């Protein structure tokens, strides 16, 4: 069986999952599903990058042990992917022993080969990028990548002889035109390699940065976070641990990256592989950025689009379709809620959805919901059209041109709609002598619908499965004469005007000029109250004894809490932010004298306090463990 290995970058654990993370991961999932459908054995890898100075500093700021901090933030990514129907084979974390020990193996291997040496270094260091720069690299005295200030550092470090592989890498790239895609990125890397390539600093002293993988040949140093992170693509598939698995899986067929990490993957990673005498990936594809109002998404600007909010707003399949259809893969794109709504309504609801309803409704009406036979074998006019369309679709998928592959879906919809109008099955149904002709039109139409189902399946798996159920089959080959179909509800419900306004409010980030502006309260303060007003609210500590989802609700959890003097049932709208097991045993603060209310048929006797942090609810509790029922003043 042919194997296919695809990777995403591993996402830095200090990041909040945003549109860019979803974009890369959905693209990888589309490819993984497509290749599985071709009968290939797919290994799809994603994960989190958890070492380095940023993680350590963020943990200190949060007042948490570093491992506890990265455990919590890695889970945010792990919990997001099922909401987007991501089917990754593995999720690697760089703090796992299976990774750390093999990074040390790679370092020791290079050291033994004489490819790592110690030297004094003096230069400028950017903490957010965890990268050294020379004086000539700086832009107005700041980091050329992120624009932030840099610190001057002089220290002993270890270096990998990356420069030894410069000419070999140039020749390889020139000899393999599809190795770096799209072509503009290939040219960018070759342009970078026109300048002398220095050696790569691959260590940090523990005195400055203790959070990392220790160098096996010097206990006073840890590995540079990029050397550590890049090795994940090999360690996840058995490098140094399972020779058979590694030989069967490596090299990767496609490695997807954002254009901002092009150099690290196309220069650092490739020269590391050359030095380790391992094959290079077959293809590295660097896609563009999503911007909001022309600006790159940034926590400091407050313009981050949360993927889970987008899924809640329009549905996972609709969001996946938009990401892959809206912008040619490789170019930058600008996000707007209006564009997302338009894609859902125009492409999916009005076109594909209405077409499916139209065809199945005619079969219900004219053939008692049974798929009719073909009376003239292979003469249906749509056969050649759909075959040609599927062929072009496959060509675009091979080039990772997802937008044009989906364009073929829409074109095939248009062709079938045109054929139905020209064939006039409603007129054929009135003439009994044209029964076989009607059968041919209906059968050919439903065959084309099944082909469309196959084409959308990698992009919109839930919708494709729903379409197959409407056709009464599991796979297209099962579509035979006599199969019972069911039109049922709309494949893609249209977003009405009121719902559109709600979605725009959910997905339009509030941007600001600086981080300081964003630090101001997102919600205006309520009118002032007196101490007597405040004393009317009875705030109490409570311990969560039990938690479970409220049936038929994706937002509510039903909790049993201990107030010390009694137990209460409370319903809280936190199901999209906490798993039930995550909050059992936690100390929370609740309003204990709130009148009972019924939510989704479940009575609630109180209300938990929570903070809304950019759309993420964070429960309020006590720093220290206390008994339930203590009054909060």
Image (cartoon, helix red, strand yellow):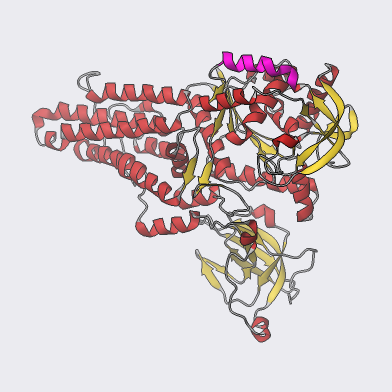
Magenta-highlighted residues:
163-176
Quadrant location of residue 268? top right
Residue 414 within the magenta-colored segment of the rendering? no
What secondary structure is the magenta-colored segment mainly?
Answer: helix
Q: Nearer the viewer, residue 4 or 306?
A: 306
Which residue is depicted at the point 43% across and 25% down? 396
Percent of width and height locating residue 530: 65, 85
Quick check: 555 above or below 155?
A: below
Q: Nearer the viewer, residue 605 or 146?
A: 146
Is residue 316 among the parts visible in the rendering?
A: no
Quick check: 557 above or below 175?
A: below
Residue 174 within the magenta-colored segment of the rendering? yes
Is 510 positioned to the left or the right of 104 in the image? left
Which residue is depicted at the point 22% across and 33% down? 418
Quadrant location of residue 417? top left
Q: Nearer the viewer, residue 340 or 425?
A: 340
| Image quarter hosting the N terminus | top right
Which residue is depicted at the point 36% across and 24% down? 390
Percent of width and height locating residue 222: 83, 35
Which residue is depicted at the point 75% across and 34% down? 134
Percent of width and height locating residue 520: 63, 65
Is 147 positioned to the left or the right of 460 in the image? right
Is residue 425 among the parts visible in the rendering?
A: yes
Is 146 positioned to the left or the right of 345 in the image? right
| Image quarter hosting the C terminus | bottom right
Is 383 positioned to the left or the right of 13 in the image? left
């Amino acid at each position: 069986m042919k194997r296919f290995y695809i990777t995403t970058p591993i996402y830095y654990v200090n990041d909040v999952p945003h549109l860019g993370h979803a974009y890369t991961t959905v693209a990888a999932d589309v490819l993984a599903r497509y290749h599985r459908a071709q009968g290939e054995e797919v290994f799809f890898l994603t994960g989190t990058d958890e070492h380095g100075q940023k993680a350590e500093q963020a943990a200190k700021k949060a007042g948490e042990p570093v491992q506890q901090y990265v455990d919590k933030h890695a889970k945010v990514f792990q919990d997001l992917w099922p909401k987007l129907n991501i089917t990754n084979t593995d999720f690697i974390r760089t703090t796992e022993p299976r990774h750390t020990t093999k990074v040390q193996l790679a370092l020791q291997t290079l050291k033994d080969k004489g490819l790592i040496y110690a030297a004094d270094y003096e230069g400028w260091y950017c903490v957010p990028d965890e990268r050294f720069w020379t004086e000539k690299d700086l832009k107005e005295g700041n980091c050329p990548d992120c624009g932030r200030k840099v610190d001057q550092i002089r220290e002993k470090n270890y270096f990998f002889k990356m420069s030894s592989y410069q000419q070999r890498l140039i020749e390889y790239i020139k000899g393999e035109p599809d190795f770096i895609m799209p072509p503009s990125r290939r040219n960018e890397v070759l342009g970078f390699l026109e300048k002398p390539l220095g050696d790569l600093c691959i260590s940090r002293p523990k005195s400055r940065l203790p959070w990392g993988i220790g160098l096996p040949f010097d206990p006073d140093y840890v590995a540079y976070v990029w050397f550590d992170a890049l090795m994940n693509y090999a360690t996840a598939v058995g490098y140094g641990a399972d020779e058979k698995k590694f030989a069967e899986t490596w090299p990767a067929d496609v490695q997807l990256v954002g254009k901002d990490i092009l150099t690290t993957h196309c220069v650092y990673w490739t020269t590391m592989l050359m030095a380790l005498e391992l094959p290079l990936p077959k293809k590295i594809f660097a896609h563009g950025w999503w911007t909001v109002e022309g600006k790159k998404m940034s926590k400091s600007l407050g313009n981050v689009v949360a993927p889970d909010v987008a899924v809640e707003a329009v549905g996972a399949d609709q969001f996946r379709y938009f990401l892959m259809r809206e912008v040619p893969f490789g170019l930058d794109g600008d996000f707007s809620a209006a564009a997302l709504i338009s894609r859902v309504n125009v492409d999916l609801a009005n076109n594909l959805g209405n077409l499916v309803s139209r065809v199945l409704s005619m079969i219900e009406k004219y053939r008692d919901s049974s798929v009719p036979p073909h009376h003239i074998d292979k003469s249906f006019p749509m056969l050649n059209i759909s075959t040609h369309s599927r062929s072009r679709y496959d060509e675009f998928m091979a080039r990772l041109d997802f937008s044009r592959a989906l364009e073929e879906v829409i074109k095939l919809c248009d062709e079938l709609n045109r054929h139905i109008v020209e064939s006039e099955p409603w007129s054929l149904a009135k003439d009994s002598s044209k029964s076989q002709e009607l059968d041919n039109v209906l059968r050919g139409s439903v065959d084309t619908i099944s082909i469309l189902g196959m084409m959308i399946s990698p992009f919109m798996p839930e919708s494709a499965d729903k379409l197959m159920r409407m056709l009464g089959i599991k796979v297209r080959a099962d579509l035979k004469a006599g199969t019972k179909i069911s039109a049922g509800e709309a494949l893609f419900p249209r977003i009405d005007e009121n719902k559109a306004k709600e979605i725009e409010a959910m997905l339009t980030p509030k941007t600001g000029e600086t981080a300081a502006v964003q630090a101001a309260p997102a919600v205006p303060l309520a009118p002032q109250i007196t101490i007597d007003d405040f004393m009317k609210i009875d705030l109490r500590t409570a311990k969560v004894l039990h938690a479970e989802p409220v049936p038929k609700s994706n937002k509510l959890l039903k909790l049993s809490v201990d107030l010390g003097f009694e137990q209460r049932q409370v319903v809280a709208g936190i199901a999209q932010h906490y798993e039930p097991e995550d909050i059992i045993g936690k100390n929370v603060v609740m309003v204990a004298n709130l009148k009972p209310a019924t939510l989704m048929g479940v009575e609630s006797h109180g209300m938990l306090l929570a903070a809304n942090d950019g759309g993420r609810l964070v429960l309020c509790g006590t720093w220290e463990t206390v008994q339930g029922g203590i009054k909060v003043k």
